[in-house]
Image: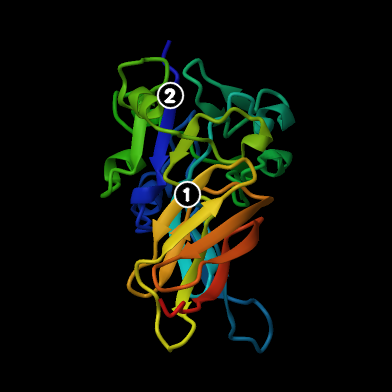
């Protein structure tokens, strides 16, 4: 049986928001009953207060939302984008919170909110730990991404998948080992967002930036950076990683575990070797670490 899922490659996402705009093009003002009622658009206007000309902005929905993640500290800062649709959970908290069958899971795994049965059920919005359900004030209903179920049932792909200029999305049948999405999962270390939520989402991510350690190596006797220094990082279990400083003296180690005390060693010919203990609990920049010339 078909079980739809998606892999999102965050490493290739450029934050263009084409997915979000395309989603709005498909759903804003358009009813696709019984799948979904029309998504509301952003609302602009003037505050209805005496002697006030201030404007108001009431945001619309973003059933697929582009997220910007900034990691690290100056001067070693990294920015990454990724999108977040409904995670289409196997154990959806929204379904558990709903009454009267307002939320259902189709045989193909798509989670739908019934636009009729869900009237007045605001608890469905707060039940989603990912924050991917919105409240429609005008219709008095909760709404979210449907994986474009109305298009899938016509043999078409979700709009975000078709529109992405960077081919970030791989979509298909998770139960078909020959499908592109199954092969992508098998060939990568794809992970769901927030596995601690224990909802078994069918949206997976690859390329998300992991915890990193960075720094700069300077010359202790001159206002200069040390290029080509060997930088070694070792964890308590003895696993080591090695890299070289670039022409600005910078180095970086990614994919690190948190709450770990690492041993950092920097060496280069004609310099004394420097060692430092670094506790990593989040993205960490040690700043400039100077090597003292050995005179040899």
**Relative to 190, residue 292 above or below:** below
In the picture provided, is 170 more to the left or to the right than 121?
A: left
16 shown above or below 143: below
The C terminus is located in which quarter?
bottom left
As helix, strand or loop, the secondary structure at mark 2 comes to strand
- Distance, label 1 to label 2, CA atoms, is 38 Å
Image quadrant in which you'd find residue 116: top right
Quadrant of the rendering where the N terminus is positioned: top left
User: Residue 255: percent from the left, percent from the top?
Assistant: 50, 48
User: Can residue 158 be seen?
Assistant: no
Q: Residues within 10 Å of mark 2 (few under 14, many from 20)?
A: many
Of labels 1 and 2, earlier in sequence is: 2
Q: Position of residue 78 (x, y in %)?
A: 45, 64
Measured along the vertical axis of the image, is residue 231 above or below residue 226? above
| Mark 2 lies on residue | 4
Name the residue carrying label 1: 241
């Amino acid at each position: 049986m078909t079980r739809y899922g998606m892999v999102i490659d965050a490493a290739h996402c450029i934050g263009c928001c084409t997915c979000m705009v395309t989603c709005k093009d498909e759903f804003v003002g358009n009813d696709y009953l019984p799948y979904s009622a029309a998504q509301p658009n952003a609302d602009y206007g003037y505050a209805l207060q005496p002697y006030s000309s201030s404007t108001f902005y009431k945001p619309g929905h973003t059933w697929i939302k582009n997220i910007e993640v900034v990691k690290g500290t100056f001067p070693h800062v990294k920015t990454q984008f990724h999108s977040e649709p409904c995670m289409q959970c196997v154990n959806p908290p929204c379904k558990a919170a709903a009454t009267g069958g307002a939320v259902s899971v189709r045989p193909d795994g798509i989670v739908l909110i019934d636009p009729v049965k869900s009237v007045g059920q605001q608890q469905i919005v707060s039940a989603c730990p990912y924050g991917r359900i919105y409240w429609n004030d005008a219709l008095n209903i909760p709404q979210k991404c449907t994986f474009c179920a109305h298009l899938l049932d016509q043999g078409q792909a979700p709009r975000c998948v078709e529109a992405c200029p960077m081919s970030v999305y791989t979509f298909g049948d998770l139960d078909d080992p020959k499908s592109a999405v199954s092969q992508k999962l098998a060939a990568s270390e794809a992970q769901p967002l927030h596995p601690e939520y224990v909802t078994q989402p069918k949206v997976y991510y690859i390329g998300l930036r992991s915890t990193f350690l960075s720094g700069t190596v300077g010359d202790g006797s001159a206002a200069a950076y040390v290029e080509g220094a060997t930088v070694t990082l070792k964890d308590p279990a003895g696993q080591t990683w090695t890299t070289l400083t670039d022409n600005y003296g910078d180095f970086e180690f990614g994919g690190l575990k948190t709450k770990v005390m690492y041993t950092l060693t920097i060496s280069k010919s004609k310099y004394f070797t420097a060692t430092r203990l670094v506790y990593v609990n989040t993205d960490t920049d040690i700043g400039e670490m100077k090597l003292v010339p050995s005179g040899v």
